[in-house]
Amino acid sequence: MIIENDKSQKTDMTNIHLVLDEKFINNSVDLFEYYYPGKNYFFVNKVLKDCKFVTPKSNVFFIPFDTPQWLERVREIVKTDLQSINILVHYLTKQSALHAMELKSISIYNRLYWMFYGADLYDYLSIRYNYQLYDYKKIGIGEKVVNKLRIALNRFKYIEDFSAVLDYFCFWNPYDYQLLCSYLKTKASFKNFYYVMNAHLNLNDSNEQSIGNKILINHSGSWTGNHLTILQALKKLDLTDKSIVLPLSYGPREHIEQIEKEVEVLFPGKYEIIKDFLPIQSYYKIIDECQYAIMGHRRQEAGGNLSFLLRSGKKVFLREDNSLFKFYKDVGYYVYSFEKDLFKEDAFTPLSSEQRQHNREVFRKRVQKENIDNMMLNLFK
């Protein structure tokens, strides 16, 4: 564990975590148990044999959220009257929202936390309010009809009800909190929280420039990456001595196929596709060969990848309507505009040694142990 000094908190509250099978969770189990020992119960929305990331521990329980008498199973495991609990929802789904609200309703003293990811709000805004995430056609007429029916049938009531009783919105980018408050009625307060990833903190501190002249495009095959927009923009530039790296290990099959066809037409023989899901260190080793990274998202996404890239001295281009562009500027990183800077003559000039060192120092200050202590010790205050 990366944390060394004993900063554990004494609390009478039980922490009930509702989680999905995500790569961040194993570290989080260790992190919460370090600061709040013996107070955490993690309930995973899968049976163990179907899990890809989350591993068994004494306080991790694999009970799908659609299990009959789910709450009774939780009572049997927690073995308290559940009158004093913190309820932490790690990525909001309809089932986790309903279970969290049920837990809150039966407790006398409780606090409800939304450990925010991104898609759990942005997908709702895209369908309910036509929030612009995509540059080109994503769905057919059938899905459009389904979404209109979902709106008409008020299928989003769970997120609206959840937000109304929410106590804390937990994330590291306050602009997403502002977005929540702009669209949903809530009295929730903002609390700083990020998933501490050991892979980010154990990096080589060398300030040497990366070898190679590759351009990374996005981190997955998701529609929100708007890959075709990036590829078509790059076609207008001189990439004679450069190649493209495309991580496509997950995402909608039809979009991945569309990306593969487009990159072959535009850049035949000058691209590399990462199709296999790799261990994080192996993946980072590959993208560390990229001098440049272009993210096509119009929403906060790929925070873990961006942390690594900025920490490693890469030149990162972001969309200006992505809240991360403003956030990273606010905290002091050198980041660049996809719309403006990509088409300048010096676009593919690497960061200087001073700029790389500056970005590294910004990252180091944000994840230094004192800040992790403050984040975790203030979470339940």
Image: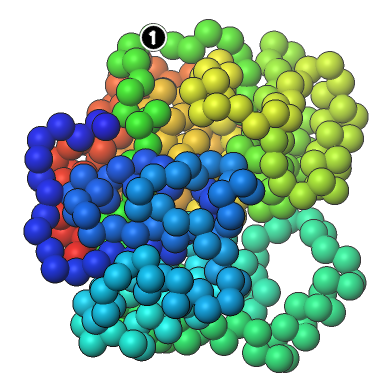
Direction from residue 127 to residue 168 in the image, left or right: left
Of 81 and 11, which appears nearest the observer? 81
Q: In this view, does 73 lie above or below 187?
A: above
Above or below, 189 against 349 in this view is below
Q: Could you tell me residue 216's position as x and y percent?
A: 62, 28
Q: Which amino acid lies under the numbered mark 1 shown in the image of this protein?
A: Glu
Which residue shows up at 41% across the image and 52% down it? 60
Instruction: Count every numbered label the image shows and give the total.
Output: 1
> Which residue appears at 61% of the width and 27% of the height?
278
Q: What percent of the width, then of the height, locates residue 119?
A: 57, 61
In depth, the one of 367 and 226 nearer the eye is: 367
Compared with 63, 234 (above or below) is above
Task: Provide the residue designation for mark 1.
Answer: 208
In the image: residue 337, left or right of residue 378? right
The quarter of the rendered structure image containing the N terminus is: top left
Residue 78 percent coordinates (x, y): 32, 67
Can residue 324 be seen in the rendering of this structure? Answer: yes
- The picture quadrant where one finds residue 65 is bottom right
Q: In this view, does 259 lie to the left or right of 118?
A: right
